[in-house]
Amino acid sequence: MRAMVVRAPGGPEALVLEHIEPPELRRNDVRIRVEACGVCFHDVVTRNGVMKRGVRMPLIPGHEVSGIVESVGPDVRDFRPGQRVATLQRRHICGHCGYCRSDRETSCEEREFLGDMDLNGGYSELVCVEEDNVIHVPDEVPLDQAAIVACTIGTELNAIRDVAQVRPGDRVLVTGAGGGLGIHGVQIAHISGAEVIAVTGSRHKVAMLREAGADHVVLASHGSDFSEEVNQITRGKGVDVAIDNVGSDTFQPTRRSLAMGARWIFIGQLTGEFVKLNPAQIFMRDISIRSAKSTNRRQFIDSMELVRRGLVKPMISHVLPLEAAAEAHRMAESAAPVGRIVLKPGLSA
């Protein structure tokens, strides 16, 4: 099969097209012929070496996969060849630990993040994923869109609905709002009844963010302090919830934008940089800091239903052939695309 392989950390040129043997089909595996694979910034930091934990090279990146079932292992019960499916971000979980049995399989100690290790990831023609991490795709949802639902919509649903527990009338700040995660966070916060403040560094993304449901769009250049404008919008009260898709670069202005008793949810970290924090700046304002890691199966199913019903729209900026993976990474690093870039192995270069 054709696959984009990374054999050592490096720039986008580290992604090299190779012809390799298909991944081994294990007893619980669903082997999927890949129709589409989203390009997440997680793929970028895995490829360039910033992400180290759980990474084992050589590898094929890609954890946002949709496609058609080609074959199944002997222990698979719910899938058969020819069905339309999409994957979670994981290749394996144990299925029986305390985490897996309490909707926290994202923390399973045995979890294997798809595309972070070995030659089995979505930047390829075939991928093997255990059936616990695969769901059926409704006929109403195009496979290109289905590929990105778990990571983009599922993670934001996790953060907004389940961790932050956003309520109608909450003021919600979304950083990195024009990116693959953020623009879906804007949509979910909007349908949750929140007043949504979207922060972006790209003027060309403003109109699409308003269309996605942002009540206010703050245009802030890289590293700038947007908190003064946020506090003007909120009449000095600050935001009740911050959904932080960026991390270190927006840490201090986000902190200055928070209301008393705010919930601050971390999802993304785009660099390897650390931040300085005086704990008094948190506890004196009764601020809760939480995180949303990935997507569990229930959140994935709920997210796909939101898409099926037309309540949330998966945002795809570019569809490129598999061989253009390096170009896709350069585009992702430029922060120019609105939403996700998708690779399609069946698309002609």
Image: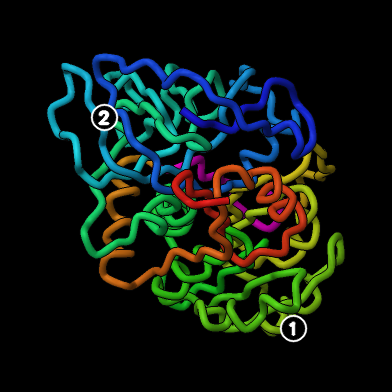
Camera-nearest residue between 118 and 173: 118
Q: Residue drawn at (60%, 54%), measured in percent from left and top?
A: 264
- N-term mark: 2 or 1: 2
Q: Nearer the viewer, mark 2 or mark 1?
A: 2
In space, the residues marked 2 and 1 are separated at their CA atoms by 49 Å
Q: Residue drawn at (58%, 51%), measured in percent from left and top?
A: 349
Camera-nearest residue between 124 and 105: 124
Q: Residue drawn at (23%, 28%), measured in percent from left and top?
A: 71
Q: Residue 93: x percent and y percent? A: 36, 23
- Please say which color scheme the image uses: rainbow
Q: Name the residue carrying label 1.
A: 232
| Highlighted magenta segment, given as a residue range | 282-295
Please tell me whether residue 291 belongs to the stretch shown in magenta. Answer: yes
**Which residue type carries mark 2?**
Glu
Q: Name the residue carrying label 2.
A: 131
Graded by Cα atoms within 10 Å as few (under 14), some (14 to 19) or many (20 or more), the crowding at tag 1 reads few
Toward which corner of the image does residue 314 lie, by quadrant? bottom left
Name above or below for residue 137 compared with residue 93: below
**Which residue type carries mark 1?**
Gln
What kind of element bears circle 1?
A: helix
